[in-house]
Image (cartoon, helix red, strand yellow):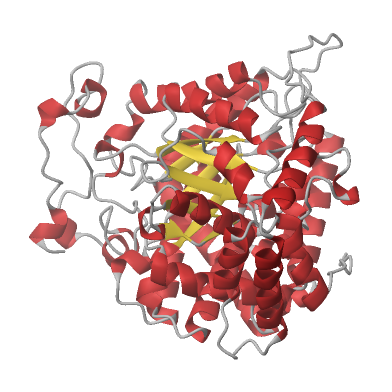
Amino acid sequence: MSDSARKPPVEDDQKLPLTLRQTQSGIKLEPVYRPPDPDAATSTYRDDLGDPGAFPFTRGPHASMYRGKPWTMRMFSGFGTPEDTNHRFKFLLAHGQTGLSTAFDMPTLMGFDPDDAQARGEVGREGVSVASVADMERLFDGIALDQVTTSMTINAPAVALLAFYVVVAERRGIAPEALGGTLQNDMLKEFIAQKEWICGVRPHLRIVRDMLVYCTARMPRWNTISVSGYHIREAGATAVQELAFTLADGIAYVELGRAAGLDVDTFAQRLSFFWDVHSDFFEEVAKLRAARRMWAHIMRDRFGSKSPRAQMLRAHAQTAGVSLVAQQPLNNVVRTTLQALAAVLGGTQSLHTNSYDETFALPTEEAATLALRTQQIVAEESGVPAVADPLGGSYFVESLTDRMQAEATKLIETIDGLGGMVRAVELGWPQREIAEAAYRTQRQIDTGERPVVGVNRHATATTHPIPTLKIDMAAEREQRESVAAVRARRDDAACRAALDRLRRTCAADENAGGNIMEDVLEAARRDATLGEICRVFRDVFGEYRDPAHV
C-alpha cells in the first residue's frame, strides 16, 4: 500500500466539531484506523478492505467519510395537493433536512390523471398528486431547483415525472445540466416486488434505456436509476436476497446502457443504490460493506470499468417500514434509531428515517421532525461519524461481510445461469424466492420464534392512541379541477402533435433512432398530462398483467 493511500485526509482539526475530534474524555480521534503496519498486513486486508475511498470501497466510498461531509438527510414527503407537500418540504428544510425526497400517490405511481375513474378515492392519499407541469411547478414553488437535490420515488411513469421537473426548470431559466437528484426508475424491482407497472418488462426497459441516453448527455448531476433493494426487502426478502437481487438488477441496467452504446465509465457513475435497513444490526452493517465491495469487483472485472467513480457504489438507505408495528407504536422510535445507526456504521451516503406513526398513516409534522432529529442526534451527539468505518477490523463484522458476499454471489450465479435478471424475472424465479422467504419469516413471528416486542413479546392489553395525519378529501376535487384547467388553457393541437410523435417513436423499431425521453419532454412542454403520456404507452405496448408467480 502506497504512502499516499495510507495518509489520513489533511484537515484542520480546529474547524471540526468537537465530537469529530475527540471522545467525551478528551481522547484524540484519528480519521481512520488501520492495522499497525498496513504494508505488512495480510492480503485480505489489502485486497478486500483497503482504505476508505479506495478500491474495493468496503470501508466506505470516501476517504474522510462523515468528517468531510455528513450524509444527506432526506425525509420522504408527499401527500394531498402539491401545495400541501410544498409546505411540508419547506417545513423540513427549515428544520435541517438537506435533501428533498418525494412520495407520489397511487394514481401518479400508476400513470393515471386524478380525474380518471381508476384514481377515484386515491388522489393524494398516500403521496402527492402530480399530473402535469403545472402541478410540478406548484410542488416546488419557492424552492431553488439548482440549489437542492431532489429524489423522486417513481418508476413506471418516471419518464413523465422527470420531464415535468426538467420543464419546470426550463421555465425558470435553469438548464438540465444544473439539476441534481435521483429518480428511482427501477422497473426490474417493480416486477420482482412492488408490482406498479404500465406495460411489460422489455418495453419498460426500452424507456429506461432512452432515459439513460438522454440523462448521460444532458443531466450529468442526475442519478437516472436508483437500483432499489428497499422494496425487494419490504416484500419479504432476506438481507442476502436483497443484496443479490439488487446487484443483479444493477448488472442488468449496466448491460442496458452498454447495449445503447454508452461508455460504462460515464453512465455508470450516475447509477445509485437504495437499501432497506432492518434491526438485525450487524447483518445490515455487513450488507452495506459487502455491497460496495461486490459492486466494485462487478464493475471492474465483469464490465472492464477503469474509473473509480464508476466502480464506487453510491448508497441511499431507509429504515425498514415493514419493521414498524401498530402495537406500542413509540417502540418504533427505538427501532428506527437502531436501524439508522446501522446505516451510518455501514457507510450510507444518504438516509431517510421512518416516522413512528407510519404504520397507521402518513407521518404528522411532529413525527417527521422526530425522525429527522434521530438522524441529527446520531450525526452531532454520538461521535459515530468521527471515524471512517469504525467497525472495520472487527472479527465478527469482517466474517459476516465475507459470508454475506459469498451467499449473495451464489444467488447472482444462479441468475446468470437463468440468462440474466431480465429473463429470471420473466420466469418468476426471484418472485418465488421472495415469497418463500416472506412466508418463513411470518411463520417465525406467528410462532414466537422471531421476537417482536409488543407483538409476541412483552405485549400489553391496553392501547394508547396517537395522533395521525388526516388527508382532506378536498385534495381530490382540487386536483381534478387542476388537471381540467391545464387541458382547457393549453394549445390542444400542439399537444396532440407532440403525443402523436411520441406514439410513432414507441411504435417504431427500438433501433430506429427516436428517443422516447426527448419526445416525452416535448409533450410535457406542450402541457400533456401524465395520464395522456402513459396512455400512449398502454396503447402501443399493451398493459401488463401479473402472471402471479408463486
Residue 469: give x, y in percent of width and height.
73, 21
Residue 238: give x, y in percent of width and height.
67, 53
Residue 56: give x, y in percent of width and height.
34, 64
Q: Is residue 88 left or right of residue 181?
A: right
* Quarter in which the N terminus is drawn: bottom left
Q: Is residue 278 left or right of residue 223?
A: right
Identity of the residue drawn at 58% across and 29% down? 336
Identity of the residue drawn at 79% across and 24% down? 472
Q: Compared to 93, does 109 lie above or below? A: below
* Quarter in which the C terminus is drawn: bottom right
The answer to which quarter of the image holds residue 128 is top right
Judging depth in this view, the residue of 339 and 487 nearest the camera is: 487
Judging depth in this view, the residue of 160 and 360 nearest the camera is: 160
Q: Is residue 424 visible?
A: yes
Identity of the residue drawn at 27% across and 55% down? 53
Judging depth in this view, the residue of 274 and 452 nearest the camera is: 274
Q: Compared to 370, does 214 lie above or below? A: below
Q: Compared to 424, does 137 lie above or below? A: above
Q: Is residue 408 visible?
A: no
Judging depth in this view, the residue of 290 and 166 nearest the camera is: 166
Q: Compared to 283, does 184 lie above or below? A: below
Identity of the residue drawn at 54% across and 20% down? 369
Residue 324: give x, y in percent of width and height.
70, 31
The number of numbered badges drawn on the structure is 0
Q: Is residue 295 left or right of residue 37?
A: right
